[in-house]
């Protein structure tokens, strides 16, 4: 991945999530997760977002994006969507995004977010609280010899989305870098 993105996660070992479960408040006391998962963070303050992988029989996928943006970031994203919704629609309707991921997923508010009209042309995007793209894999695909290459290509296909979000989150409304 370091050949096509600046990754902060220094090793594969550092990218893995723990295999044991917190069973303190769960009725199911199974001590281990039934999946193997982890993630890679993009490096520097200018490269935002991250990559995630999840391997589990019958439920394997890779994903990326913004799982839980802080309130300031969410506000900046929504402001950019409101002002540049044609570019956002074009990004999510792009051939590569649609073929690889389908559509944007994530939690949404029930109606229009505060400060936005229900009639706004981009209300479908403005309602999102999470901004994620996900690709699922069959068990047969996971054990195939080309799986790692396919995952890497999937992460490459995620880059335009992550780069766009990075631009939105690291510049002010006038296009000036927040880190200069």
Image: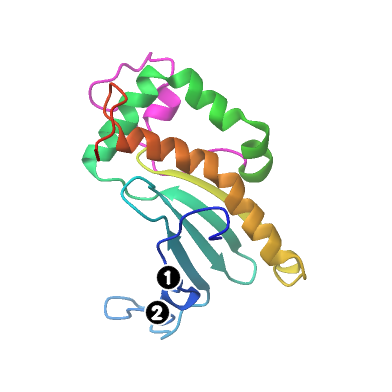
Residues in magenta? 102-127
Tell me: residue 75, above or below residue 6: above
Residue bearing the label numbered 2: 28
Left/right placement of residue 176 relative to residue 4 reads left
* Left or right: 26, with 11 as reference point: left
Image coords of residue 102 (percent x, y): 62, 40
The quadrant in which the N terminus is found is: bottom right
Q: Quadrant of residue 92?
A: top right
Q: To which quarter of the image does residue 111 belong? A: top left
Front of the two marks 1 and 2:
1
Report if residue 62 is visible in the image: yes
Identify residue for label 1.
10
Label 2 Cα crowd, 10 Å radius (few <14 / some 14-19 / many 20+): few
Q: Nearer the viewer, residue 117 or 166?
A: 166
Q: Answer whether residue 119 is magenta in the image.
A: yes
Q: Is residue 155 magenta?
A: no
């Amino acid at each position: 991945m370091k050949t096509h993105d600046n990754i902060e996660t220094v090793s594969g070992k550092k990218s893995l999530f723990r295999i044991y479960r917190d069973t303190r408040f769960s009725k199911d006391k199974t001590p281990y997760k039934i999946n193997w998962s982890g993630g890679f963070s993009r490096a520097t303050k200018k490269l935002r977002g991250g990559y995630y992988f999840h391997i589990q029989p019958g439920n394997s996928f890779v994903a990326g994006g913004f799982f839980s943006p802080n309130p300031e970031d969410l506000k900046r994203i929504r402001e950019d969507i409101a002002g540049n919704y044609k570019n956002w629609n074009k990004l999510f309707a792009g051939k590569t995004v649609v073929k690889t991921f389908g559509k944007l997923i994530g939690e949404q508010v029930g109606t229009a977010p505060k400060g936005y009209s229900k009639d706004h042309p981009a209300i479908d995007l403005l309602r999102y609280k999470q901004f994620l793209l996900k690709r699922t894999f069959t068990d047969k695909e996971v054990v195939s010899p080309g799986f790692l290459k396919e995952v890497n290509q999937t992460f490459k296909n995620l880059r335009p989305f992550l780069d766009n979000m990075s631009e939105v989150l690291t510049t002010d409304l006038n296009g000036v870098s927040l880190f200069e």
